[in-house]
Amino acid sequence: MTPKNFLLSALITFASAAMTLGQEQNKESNEAAYTRVVNERAAKIVATLNLSDPKQSTRVQEAIAQQYKRLNTLHESRKQELATLTETDKKEAVETETASKLASLHKDYLTALAHELTPQQIEQVKDGMTYGVLPITYKGYQAMLPDLTNEQKGQILTYLTEARERAMDEGSSKEKHAMFGKYKGRINNYLSAAGIDMKKASKDWEERIAKEKEADKSRK
């Protein structure tokens, strides 16, 4: 090998090594940033539980953070696998396998929480992981439709509870909200089938809210 070729080869090798090192450093940096984010999310959720034992708080925070990480790993793996496939049957197989793993992960997670928390506290964790959409939406339906029967309220709560269980396992805020959106569609169809004009109810509710805001301004 001539000196020129040797130098060129050495430069290529060095550049390749530098690129690999840079990729590894970026990966480590991204992982560190993600770890910090999920730890902060978990800490905020734990803060709502008012746990008096610092060690218990740490265990619960670690359990929540680990769940976020495991969900992220599983969803990223699914995306990467799907990106390499073109056959519908193979894609469906990946989706089925992912769903099975998510169900197992969900069950194990709730079992771990049950060792540390009361059922009410677990409900708070679930709401924390899903941005409180269930209680906010349930309250909204009752405010919009004050004449709902107990049976209708129960069905709405059942739909929202199922939505929350599934949303907990989604990998992003957008996907969590999309899951609730799907179930809100079911709720609206259920109420429409019961003879409720949802468009009119929504319009009337908006008008009531506007009037209440105007009344508040007048009182001030």
Image (spheres, rainbow, N blue to C red):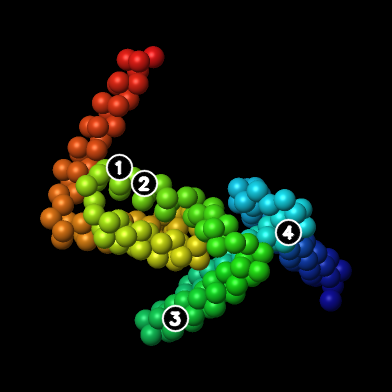
Marks 1/4 in contact by CB < 8 Å: the verdict is no
Pick the front one: 73 or 132: 132
Residue 217 placement (x, y as % from top left): 35, 18
- Residue 95 is marked as none
Secondary structure under tag 4 reads helix
- The quarter of the picture where the C terminus appears is top left
Between the residue at mark 2 and the residue at mark 1, the CA separation in whole angstroms equals 6 Å
Which residue in the structure is indicated by mark 4? 56
Which residue in the structure is indicated by mark 2? 139
Secondary structure under tag 3 reads helix
Which residue in the structure is indicated by mark 1? 143
Q: Are there few (<14), some (14-19), or many (20+) residues within 10 Å of tag 4?
A: some
* Circle 4: residue type: Gln
In the rendered image, the vertical position of residue 70 relative to residue 50, given as above or below? below
Secondary structure under tag 1 reads helix
Q: Are there few (<14), some (14-19), or many (20+) residues within 10 Å of tag 1?
A: some
Q: Residue at x 27, y 56 (%)?
A: 150
* Circle 2: residue type: Lys
